Structure formats: C-alpha cells, structure tokens
Amino acid sequence: MPSLGDLFPGENSPVGRHAGSYDPSTSRARLFFRIAVGIVIFLLLAWPFIEPFMLETESTFLTAQDLPAGIGQLRIVYVTDIHMSGPFGRSRVNSLISHINACNADIVLLGGDYAKDSTGAIDFFRNLPRIHARYGVYAVLGNHDRTIPEANLTTLRAAMQAAGVTPLVNSVSRVRIGTQDIYIAGVDVPGNGRPDLQGVASQVNASDYVIFLCHTPSIIPEAMKAKDRNDRQGWFDLGLFGHTHGGQVAVIGPLLRDDGVPDHYTQGWFKQNRTDLLVSRGVGTSGLPVRLFCTPQIHLITVTAPK
C-alpha cells in the first residue's frame, strides 16, 4: 500500500524536487518584470501631470522684408496662456519671468489668458515681477481675462501699465528702435471681447514692419482679408496667437475643442502669402492640469532684415 509520501511527494523527495523545483533566477526575473510593469503603469498615469512642468524654449529665425535695415536684428520673446491658478501658482510665475528675462529680449509679447478670470488677471499683474526688454513689453487679453464685470477691464489695464506692460486692446504701439520704427498691433479677443480688426489694420501701412497679436487664431482668416490705411492687404508681417494649448492632450485634444479654431491652426508655424504665423502651445493648462505629448513652450524669435 503506498504511503502518503508516495501520493503527495514533498520537496525533499526526488519526485517533489523534479515537479516543483525552486529556481532563484526565475523568481528574480519575475520580480524585476513586475517592478518594470509597475513603473510603466505609474509613468503612464503620472506623465500627463509631469509634462506641464517641462517648459521648452523654441528658437526660430525669420527674415522679414519690411524690417528696416537700420534695425538689422530683432529678438522677440512670445509667451501666452499662462493660466495662473491651482498648480501654476505664484512661484511658477516668478520662475517663468526669470526664464523670460534670461532670454535677453528686445521686445517681450504676451498673448493673453493670464489667470482663470479677469479678477485673477488683475492679481497676476499686480504681483508680476518686472519683465526686462530693451524696447518694452506688450500684451493682448484672452477670453479668461475678459470676464465679467466689464469694469474689470479698466482695472486690468491699469494693473498692466503699473507692471510696465503696454495693453493692446484694439490699438497699435509704435516702437522706436534707433532711428527706425516698427509697430505692434493688438485686438481684443473675439467672443468675450469687442475686437475691431479693421480699425487696427487701418492704423498702419503694408510697407511697415508690423507684429499682430490676438489671443485666438480663429481671427486669422479675417485678419488676412483686412486692409491697411491705403486699402491694401498684407498689413502685418508676423502674427502671434495662442488659446489652443496645442490641443493640450495630443491626438484627442483637438477633437475635444469647440472654440471655432480650424484644426490646421492647432499649433505651429505657418506661412500665408508673405506673413509668418505662429500658434503657440502656451505655458499653462485649463481644465485638468495635464498635458500629453504637448509640452508647454515659450518662443524666442529672431527676426533679421534682408542683406
């Protein structure tokens, strides 16, 4: 009659050692595999919350026919969609301004959406560290900056001026560089604001070097049709826009937008006629504080006159 040891061989029996032998190397391999899978899962879940902190500086070089030869070269820093609130608090704003100042810009341009609403935008500028630029800092407003009450617009513009920033709300600033002039034009944001595109275009000549700012690229088709004071199109040389966040979450981001911006204006550089156009991914986030394969960016644009 077989014993219990024969029916249920233990690890000390020859049969038991053969059937269920313990291999330390296999056990370690499984442990490492489980750790690797855990790390991958963690990164997949955490990465969208990490990416918003990975600020990039995109450097671009342009040649502009209308830039006066006496100026030679112009260094422009463009920053948009900061969205100060929640995880993008005051310390990150201060760090961003240090980053901007390190670019040693001739002109700094801001593209709107400084906080979550107009009250937050007022606070943003009232506590803004000084931005350094040889020929000034200029800014337009975004849809988040143009929220009720309407009286906040006057307060916001005053806060911007006190911070050393020139607000461009349907207006044009002439910038004197040596003995030459360039122009920076900005319109109010469509939707929440009251844009006067043709009124702005009619203040310049197509032969001037003009930088055009508006928060949203939805205005591009209309801007390309607007005419200068001499009834000519092609009134601006460089157009800078934001608002889209580049989709914020790649692939599905553009599908979730309902902002009137054509999909081909989601992000990047474009050339229409003789005009250079940029739609920036911006710096901050809206909705959930996440980005995916759509890192935040600021822009250092070097414009040179033809030789």
Image (cartoon, grey):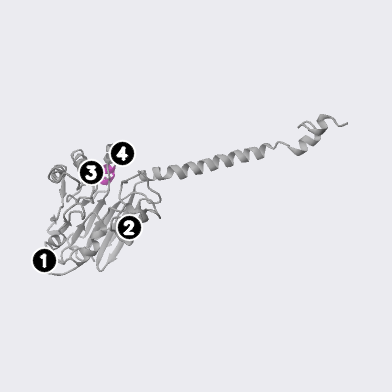
Is residue 98 part of the magenta span, yes or no? Answer: yes
Q: Residues within 10 Å of mark 1 (few under 14, many from 20)?
A: some
Q: Secondary structure at mark 2?
A: loop
**Amino acid under disc 3:** Asp
Q: CA distance from mark 4 to mark 2?
A: 25 Å
- How many numbered marks, from 0 up? 4
Q: Nearer the viewer, residue 232 or 192?
A: 192
Q: Mark 2 highlights which residue?
A: 266
Give the residue displayed 77% in from the left and 35% down from the top.
16
Q: Quadrant of the N terminus?
A: top right
Q: Quote the CA–CA distance across marks 4 and 3.
A: 13 Å
C-alpha gap between disc 1 and disc 3? 35 Å
Mark sitting on residue 117 = 3
SS for tag 3? loop
Kind of residue sitting beneath label 4: Gly
Q: Closer to the camera: disc 2 or disc 1? A: 2
The answer to which of 211 and 246 lies nearer the viewer is: 246
Residue 98, by quadrant, is: top left
Q: Earlier in the sequence, mark 2 or mark 1?
A: 1
Residue at x 50%, y 43% (from the top left corner): 41
Q: CA distance from mark 2 to mark 3?
A: 23 Å
Q: Quadrant of the C terminus?
A: bottom left
Q: Which residues are magenta?
A: 96-101
Disc 1 residue type? Arg
Q: Position of residue 271 (x, y in %)?
A: 29, 65
